[in-house]
Amino acid sequence: MSAAVLLLMLKQITIVGSGSWATALVKLFTENEIRVFWLMRKRDQVDYILQKGHNPRYLSYVKLKKELIIPTIEPTVALRSTEFVIFAVPSAYLKDTLQLIDLELLESRQLGVSIKGMIPGTGYTPSHFLKKHTGFRDLRVTVLSGPCHAEEIANQKSTYITIAADDPGWANELCETIESNYIHAIPNNDPAGIEFTSVLKNIIAIATGMANGLQYGDNFQAVLVSNAMNEASRFLDSINPRVRNLFHSAYFGDLLVTAYSEYSRNRTLGKLVGRGIYINEALQAMEMIAEGFHASKELDPLLRKLEIELPVINSVHRVLHNHANPYHEFKLLESRLS
């Protein structure tokens, strides 16, 4: 099905996920008069949204256009009438979520992911996992990325969203459907690069959070992030070499907002660990999942195969998964940065 034909039919979509980012996406699409089938995990959330027009758990202060929302816990109801399905669940939940869905319901659909992490136990990015799990020949997955925090979309702050797809026509058409007075959608033809950048930026945000928790100042954190950008560039050139402008907002822009924003869950996790809180306790203290934790573990075997020097990213892995002392790791890092 061509992008032009799909656009004519894009009057209703499905969003899978019930967290803050899924809620922001529902807000974004319904504001543009697109009907959203919303596949959620819990019946009480569905009932509350039907009655009140709010998500009771995430971004609960946001009034949603409930006349354009069909929340449900039934995959068949959510998927049978739409052409475009966006998965917006934490990466740790994607595998279990797909187990609940009849793959025949996805076969003729355009699929998208807005998940910034790697699938635990697989070594795959979300789009790669979808392709492997479904087994659909020639499946192309659209990647929706940032830099954008759900909280700022909720407050209608000026936001730039990247739509990355192998089909440039489809990316352009989808951008047109979500543009608004505060949403600026940018097409991109590098979904793999965008997806890997979103994995790296969460790990790097944990590093900046650790530096903050260890009471390093802004000067050091700036050096840390600039070195981490070089690491991201080396990694992308190794794993998916192509011409790309890493200073585009979808790459380093997304990295910067995650590294520095107080909304960043990954930065918050790093701060807790930097302050001396054990990683398990820090994870339990988090209200939402910090994707960089799982991503760091999943990415490590790939980094070993590539044999490239990534001191910042490797230090985060040692602290999170090898019980390394963050103070000692950052003292060692000081001599590795330039």
Image (cartoon, rainbow, N blue to C red):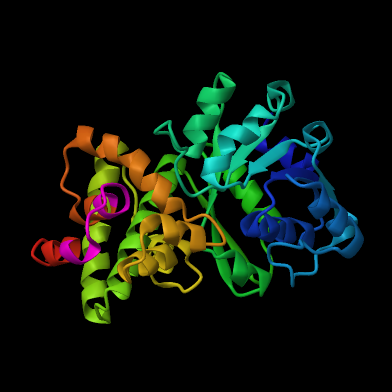
Q: Is residue 142 above or below residue 214?
A: above
- How many numbered marks have been drawn onto this rendered protein structure? 0
Is 17 left, or right, of 229 in this rendering?
right
Residue 55: % across, % down: 76, 61
Q: Is residue 147 visible?
A: no
The overriding secondary structure of the stretch rendered in magenta is: helix
Say whether residue 325 is magenta: yes
The answer to which of 38 and 254 lies nearer the viewer is 38
Q: Residue at x 58, y 41 (%)?
A: 93
Q: Is residue 148 visible?
A: yes
The answer to which of 162 and 333 lies nearer the viewer is 333
Say whether residue 209 is magenta: no
Residue 43: % across, % down: 82, 47
Where residue 237 sits, quadrant-wise, is: top left
Q: Residue at x 56, y 18 (%)?
A: 137
Highlighted magenta segment, given as a residue range = 317-328
Q: Residue at x 74, y 26 (%)?
A: 105
Residue 219: % across, % down: 22, 80
